[in-house]
Amino acid sequence: MLTLKQLREDKENTIARLAVKGVDAAPIIAQIEAEDDRRKAIQQKLDASLAEQNALAKEIGKLFGSGRKEEAEAAKAKVSSLKEASKTLEEQLREATEHMNALIVTLPNVPAAIVPEGKSAEDNLVVKITDLPDPLPADALPHWELAKKYGIIDFELGVKLTGAGFPVYKGQGAALQRGLISMFLDRNTRAGYTEVMPPLMVNEASGFGTGQLPDKEGQMYHVTNDNFYLIPTAEVPVTNIYRDVILDEDTLPVCLTAYTPCFRREAGSYGKDVRGLNRLHQFDKVEIVRIEKPENSYRALDEMVAHVESIVKELELPYRILRLCGGDISFTSALTYDFEVWSAAQKRWLEVSSVSNFETFQANRLKLRYRDTSRKPQLAHTLNGSSLALPRIVAALLENNQTPEGIRIPAALAKFTGFDMIK
C-alpha cells in the first residue's frame, strides 16, 4: 500500500510513474486528498471538543468546591453534550479514514525508475539470454507425451481424483519432484536462507498484507466456512510471519526459504499454452523471502537474481532473464525479473521464476517496521523470488534431455534423485 505521505508530497512523480503501469492515478489521488482534508478537519473538531471537555471537568470540581452547584450542573450538562458530539465526530473520523484507505489500496505499487514502458509481455526487456541447444530430432516428444511414455506423470488420473490441473506423479516422476525440492532447499539454505514450513491456508489479514486481497481473490481457492484461502505462493504466509512486528536494525536482513504446494484457480486460462505442466491449479514451489533496510534492498534483489541464476545453470537449462515492463509487472511489485527456460520440444520459453522488490508497499500493509539508530520505527523493504517453481522446470528437463536411452538427469540434480536416467 502506498503511503499517504508519498501520495501528498510526491504526487506528480507518483502519477507519472503509475502511468507506466497503465494507471491514471490523478483522479483517485484527488479523491484521497479530499478525504484526507475532511479527516483532518474532523480530527481538529474532535480534538477541540475533547480539550473543552477536559477543561470543563477541571472547572466542575472547582465550582462544586466553592458551592456554585448550579454552575457546576450546567457545566456537567455541557460536558454530556460534548461527549455525544464527540461520538458523532469519532464515527465520522472512522468513516473518513476507512474511505480514504479503501481508495489508497486500489492504487498499485509505484514502479522503479528502470522499469521499461510497455503494455504486455511482448514489451519486456531481455537483460540476459544463453545460447539455445541444437534442435531436437523430428520425432522428439513434448513433456506430456514423455510423461505418459515413461509412466512418471498421470494427468488423466489427476482429472479423475480432482480435475484438470492436478496431476499425479509416479515412480521416478515423484522422485524427480522430491529431488528438485531437496536441491532447491539445499542451495537456498547454503546461501544463508533459513528454512521454514508455513501453513498452506491463510486468513484475510495475511492475504491483504502481501497484496493478494483485495486484488486477486478471484484467483485463490477460498475455504468459505472458515474464511481461509489456500496459498497461491509461500510468499504469503512467510512474509506475514512479520506482520505487526518491529524488528531491531541489527536483525536485518531476514532471509527465509520455504517449500510449499501452491494453489491457483488460473481463471481464464485456456488453449495450447496450458497443456501438461505448463499451467496447473496445484504445483510445488520453493520460495525465498527477504526483509531488508531500504538502502540495501536493490543490492539484495541483484543477489537474489544471481542466486536463482546459479540454480538454473546447475540444471543445465538454456535460460533468459527479463526485466518486466510496466504493463506486465504485478500490482504489488516495484521491480521484477522473470526467469524463463527453453522448452525444446514446444519451442517456446517457459517462466519458472519471478524475483521482485516490493519496497515498502507490502510492509505498509503488514505494518512491518524496524528501529534504526534513532530508535524511530521505519518501514522495511520486502523481496521475494521463486527458487524455483517446479512444473515448467520439469517440463524443460524432460523435453531437453530426452535421448533414445531415456531422459538424462543433470549431474547436480542426480545427487538428489538417486538416478541419472529416467527409463
Image (cartoon, helix red, strand yellow):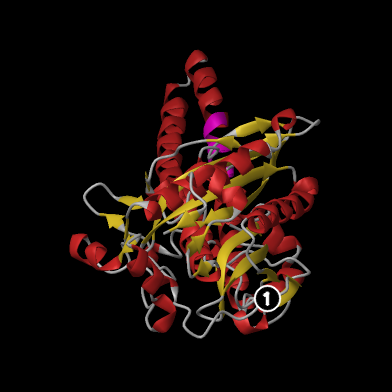
Q: Position of residue 148 (x, y in %)?
A: 33, 68
Q: Secondary structure at mark 1?
A: loop
Q: Which residue is drawn at the image coordinates 37% and 74% (left, top)?
A: 145
Question: In the shown orientation, is residue 396 left or right of residue 361?
Answer: left
Of residue 57 and residue 258, the one placed in the foreground of this image is 258
Left or right: 56, with 37 as reference point: left
The residue under the point 61% across, 57% down is: 315
Query: Start and end of the magenta stretch?
Result: 44-54
- Single out the residue that lies furthest toward the front: 405
- Viewer-proximal residue, 25 or 170? 170
Vertical relation: 51 (above or below) 207: above
* Residue at (59, 40) in percent of width and height: 186
Q: Is residue 273 magenta?
A: no
Please give the residue where the numbered disc 1 appears in the rendered image: 132
Q: Amino acid at mark 1?
A: Leu
Write down the quadrant of residue 216 in the picture: bottom left
Which of the two residues, 65 or 417, is positioned nearer the viewer here?
417
Q: Is residue 366 toward the left or the right of residue 173 in the image? A: right
Report if residue 261 is visible in the image: yes
Q: Is residue 201 above or below residue 37?
A: above
Q: Residues within 10 Å of mark 1 (few under 14, many from 20)?
A: few
Q: Position of residue 175 (x, y in %)?
A: 41, 48
Question: Which quarter of the rendering shows the C terminus?
Answer: bottom left
Residue 332 location (% of width, % of height): 58, 61
Q: Would residue 202 be found to the left or right of residue 222 on screen? A: right
Whether residue 90 can be seen here: no
Magenta span: helix, strand or loop, mainly?
Answer: helix
In which image quadrant can residue 5 be found?
A: bottom right
Dividing the image into 4 quarters, which one contains the N terminus?
bottom right
**Most foreground residue, 412 or 250:** 412
Image position of 51 with respect to 333: above or below: above
